[in-house]
Amino acid sequence: MDIKESIRRNFARRAGSYDRHADVQRLMAQGLLARVQEELAHPRRILEVGCGTGYLTALLCRSNGGGELVALDLDAALIEEARRRLGPDARVSWLVTDGESFSQGDFDLIIANATFQWFTQPGATLRAYFQALSPGGCLAFSTLGPETFGELDVSMRQAAAAMNLETAPEITARRFLNSRDWEDLLTRAGFSRVQMARQIITAHFPNVPDFLRALKALGATNPRPRPFSPRLFNALIQAYEARFRQNGSVPVTYEVIWSLARK
Ligand SMILES: C[S@@+](CC[C@H](N)C(=O)[O-])C[C@H]1O[C@@H](n2cnc3c(N)ncnc32)[C@H](O)[C@@H]1O
C-alpha cells in the first residue's frame, strides 16, 4: 500500500476517537492561532491543510470575520467529522485531497496544525504553497520534531537489545524534520522573515499501554508498520516503565515546532 494511503487510513480509522486524545494537538493549535492573530485582524482568504476533525477550522472560522476559508484533508471521514463540528451554516469549502498536490489559489494565509510532519515531499510542497500565496501572504504551521516520543525510542531499542534483535522497529517520529530543516526548506522555497519556535511538552499517562492506546486512537501510528511480537511489546512496556516511571505516571515527550513565514 502506498504511504499516503496508509497515513490516510490510520487517521480515517480514528475519526471517532481522535478528539478525546488530542490534548497536545489542541495546545499546538492554540499556539498557532496566537501567532496569526495579527493576520486575522482583517478577513482573509485562508487555506487550512490537514483540517482533520476541524478543531482549528472552528477557531479560524470564528476569528476570520466572514473571510474565505478552504479546509482540506486526505480523508473524507475526517472532513465529515469537521463538517459536523462546524454545522451546516459554516462558510467553509471542504475538500478531500492531498495537501501536497494542492497548489492552485491566491491565499493570504496557508495554515496547518500538526500535519506537516506527515509530508513526504516537504520541499516541493513548500514551493507550491509559496506560489499559492498572494504577495505578502503568510504560511503558518505547527509540526512535531524528531525528539517526539524519545522515551518510546529509547525503550524500544533497549527492549530489542535485551531480546538480541539486530534492529529495533523504528519509531516514526525519529524521521520527522527538525526546526533547522524546516527553516532551510522555507528559505529555499523563497519565504522570508521566517520565524521558528520550539517547545518540549511533556504529557503524562498512568501507564505505557494507556499511552500506546492513545497513540492508536489518534491515528498517529507508523504508516509503514513492521509487525512485532507480543514478547517485544511486553519487553518494550517493561523497559519504558522501569526507566521512566516517576511519581505514579509515565512521561511522553512532544517536540512542538511552530513556524511563521512570509512571501
Ligand atoms: C494529527 S492530525 C491533525 C488534525 C487537525 N489539524 C488538528 O489539529 O486536530 C493530522 C491530519 O493531517 C492529515 N494529513 C496528513 N497528511 C496529509 C496530506 N498530505 N494532505 C492533507 N491532509 C493530510 C491527516 O488526515 C490528519 O487529519
Image: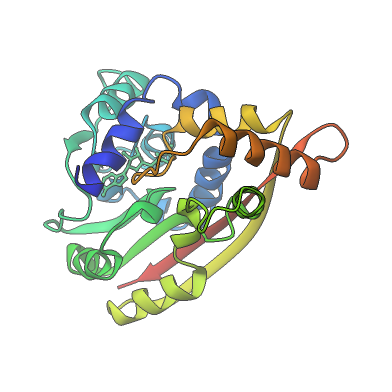
Does the rendering let one see residue 128? yes
Q: Ligand 1 is found in which quarter of the picture?
A: top left
The count of marks equals 0
Residue located 36% across and 42% down the image: 64
> Outermost residue, right direction?
247
- Residue 224, given in percent of the width and then of the height, sits at 34, 46
Applied colour scheme: rainbow
Q: Is residue 110 above or below residue 238?
A: below
State the residue at coordinates (59%, 60%).
147
The quadrant in which residue 10 appears is top left
Q: Position of residue 163 (x, y in %)?
A: 62, 47
| Residue 37 in view, yes or no | no
**242 with respect to 135 (left or right):** right
Task: Choose top left, top right, bottom left or bottom right for residue 84.
Answer: top left
Q: Is residue 20 left or right of residue 78?
A: right
Residue 48 image position (x, y, % from top left) = 30, 46
Query: Position of 117 compared to 106: left or right?
Result: right
* The image quarter in which residue 227 lies: top left
With respect to residue 143, does 78 lie above or below?
above
Residue furthest to the left in view is: 104
| 20 to 236, vertically: above or below | above
The quarter in which the C terminus is drawn is bottom left
Quarter the N terminus occupies: top left
